[in-house]
Image (cartoon, rainbow, N blue to C red):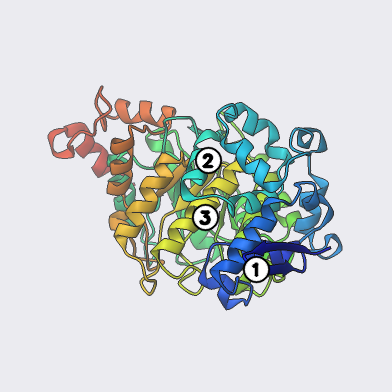
Amino acid sequence: MGYAATLGQTVYRFADLRTLLAKASPRRSGDELAGLAAGSEAERMAARRALADVPLSRFLEEAVIPYEQDEVTRLIIDSHDLQAFAQLSSFSVGEFRNWLLSSGVGAVELAQVAPAITPEMAAAVSKLMRNQDLIRVAQKCQVVTRFRNTIGLPGRLAVRLQPNHPTDDERGIAASILDGLLYGCGDAVIGINPASDSLPAITNLLWMLDEFRSRYDIPTQSCILTHVTTTIKAIERGAPVDLVFQSIAGTEKANRGFGIDLALLTEAREAALAQRRGTIGSNLMYFETGQGSALSSGGHHDVDQQTCETRAYAVARAFEPLLSNTVVGFIGPEYLYDGKQILRAGLEDHFCGKLLGVPMGCDVCYTNHAEADQDDMDNLLTLLGVAGINFIMGVPGADDVMLNYQSTSFHDALYLRRVLGLRCAPEFEEWLMRMEIIDGKRELRIASEHQALLAHAAGLLDA
């Protein structure tokens, strides 16, 4: 079955749903690199017209990657909630867009239909939306998760404290953690990208973070962002693992490139759940994704990069994570060329993830060889804050000295909370007040004026 639309005197034809989705995508360098993009703006608009008329039910009949070839497709189809889909089953993609934007649809209605929405449906409707549409609908979605604190409540913005160090030096990491805590960061997670993946090094970092957190009874969670197999081994050795991290993608082949499959993720989650380390909830997986990962590994099956990315959120959804974020500009300009493409991708990813019921954050970032700068990141950061993002990154000075890319800083998180009136996770906020890091008006204190903070600083650095 093909698809067609007429624009002016020209009839544009699209062989299948996979082609139609690719041609309807906003322009981006990754799709052009893969030879999937529309050849002109006229063809792109014709594809969007044709896509608007496609019934949502069609996405359950025509898989962009065959069911027999891909376990992610099987997960999407086998876990689809037909009962919840009844409310949407009569809609075309265009009608679905109108329903999402209607004033009568709010957080409750969106949560009810989330299990009925496949990644391809979410990706399709996003391709018909302006940036403001993506922001508006995402703002209505609420996805709340819990481990030692509560993330995703309305009016709240959590921050991953990212104290990476090029040699995994514990004093350097501790200094960065202290710096972040004094800015009110760390409620999403204190998460380290390790310079070494050796099991002894990972285990040492896990014990250091746990002692750190326990010493001051910080209501947050820690994570070492190592491969899931290393985390399983650390659990077997009795290391204190809070969150299990893994990079994931939207196809079986791309996930094999990461050295994982769904069975391995299940094993890791069950091992971590058995530790019973969460105090108020059991959401303990932490996933990271990014547009272009499937293409870069040759695992995209000629599916456009945004649809591949959204399929990764179906993987995340299946494991009920505490955190999931798109590292939006990390892969490079070969996939998202400039600030405009990075901004659009960040809004798409947040919208699609939230629509599927995934607790979305974003690493608002870029590499130094992209046509982007910190002003572009300020724009995306602000728009995501308006859109109700669950969490962002907090990196000392916004410059990750281990991974060598530009992200958002502790100061950026402070800016976003202040300008939009957002607060941190409630349990973490109470801790900040108890430790005299913020005052009764929830304003940050100046460390040099408070002896208690100086004492805590010395203790942290000596830990």
Per the image, the residue denoted by label 2 is 138
Q: Residue at x 43, y 49 (%)?
A: 208
Q: Secondary structure at mark 1?
A: loop
Per the image, the residue denoted by label 3 is 326
Q: Quadrant of residue 45?
A: bottom right
CB-based contact (under 8 Å), mark 1 and mark 2: no
First reached walking from the N terminus: tag 1 or tag 2: 1
Q: Amino acid at mark 1?
A: Gln
- Judge depth for marks 3 and 2 and give the one in front: 2
**Residue that lies at the very extreme toward the front in this rendered image:** 9
Q: Amino acid at mark 2?
A: Ala
Q: Residue at x 45, y 70 (%)?
A: 337
Q: CA separation, marks 1 and 2?
A: 37 Å
Q: CA separation, marks 3 and 2?
A: 15 Å
- Specify whether 401 is left or right of 11: left
- Specify whether 451 is left or right of 128: left
Res 9 label:
1
Q: Amino acid at mark 3?
A: Thr
- Specify whether 242 is left or right of 2: left
Q: Residue at x 64, y 32 (%)?
A: 111
First reached walking from the N terminus: tag 3 or tag 1: 1
Q: Is residue 441 above or below residue 453?
A: above
